[in-house]
Amino acid sequence: MSHKQQSAVSITWLVCSLLIVLFPGVSMAQSQNKGDASLRVEYQYIRTGNYQGDGFVADYWTTDSHIALFSGDYSFSDRLTVYAALPYVQKRFNATKGNGDPHNPNDPFWIDFVPPDKRFIDDERYHGGFQDLSFGLSYLAVDGPAWTVSPYIGYGFPTNNYPFYAKAAIGANLWNIPVGVNLSYIPFFSDWYFSGNLAYVFSEQPLDVNVDYWLGYLSAGYWFNTRFSMNVFLSVKYLRDGLILPWEFTDDPTFGNYPEAFDTEEWYHHDRLLRHRFANLGVGFDYFLNERFKLSGSYYTGVWADQTNEVDRAFTLALTHYWDGGDGD
């Protein structure tokens, strides 16, 4: 398995926005062997900024996230691979104008609906822990000299009952089932390589609201030599349904009836119910230290957001170790 082949078909589970982990950490290889495996340790930093609503922009807070992502895969055969990923997240809410409107389940306006979880974490300090454990299976359906096609299915679930009513929340605390396909293309006699990933994610439905979504990823890269390559990539999340702020919560776009109109169960769950949509654009690199270790990094920023906070800036740095089952190493 060449360095080009390894990188061209490797997709990091990009933890964009709070999701921490957009894609399963599938690291599929052309002509893979039984016993092939990889282990990846990755650091991620994400700064989010403006909230993009329907006809308004909220610019009075930011968040900082520090993430350690552990992922790996193992090939049971020359076609079937199992993968898993687990992020550890520390996140902080930062007020930038006034008090920044922290989400506080202990606010006195909660009268008709009383939040069942009283933990307050929007105190401008870091909070977090392990987020969602994900695992799944991929199948190398097409293993051509130029193309690979690998459908996959996974399952992700919260490792603990972390709070979700907070701008510093580390996730939505919902299970999900991604069903997708991973593609790669390496032109003949070329140093270019291209990869893509498209998945439909079935999600747990809070308050019976459909929050299933699409995930997309496209990447184009170039090998400058046998060890070093760079790539540009675009990642997209598109929620089909979901609620729209402010119209699904109030008929006053200026929020003049706050907080009375927001003393509801829907508002308590609003971060899980909103129609999150975004696109991020970035650049990355891969550098093979030797045959077994690869150093990777990336930088990305948000280019479009709807009903969510846009990514101001984010970067990642990762080290991957490969084992080749074909030679018993």
Image (cartoon, helix red, strand yellow):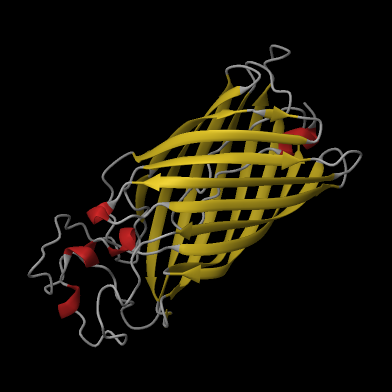
Q: Residue at x 28, y 73 (%)?
A: 248
Q: Residue at x 11, y 65 (%)?
A: 113
Q: Residue at x 80, y 30 (%)?
A: 2
**292 or 277: nearer the viewer:** 277
Percent across and percent down for residue 21 are 49, 47
Q: Is residue 289 visible?
A: no
Percent across and percent down for residue 31 are 73, 23
Q: Name the quarter where the C terminus is drawn.
A: top right
Residue that extends furthest to the right in the rendered view of this protein: 189
Q: Residue at x 30, y 76 (%)?
A: 101
Percent across and percent down for residue 68 are 49, 44
- Position of 180 relative to 248 (above/below): above
Q: Is residue 57 visible?
A: yes
Q: Name the quarter where the N terminus is drawn.
A: top right
Looking at the image, residue 74 sits to the left or right of residue 252; the answer is: right
Image quadrant in which you'd find residue 207: bottom left
- Position of 231 relative to 36 (above/below): below
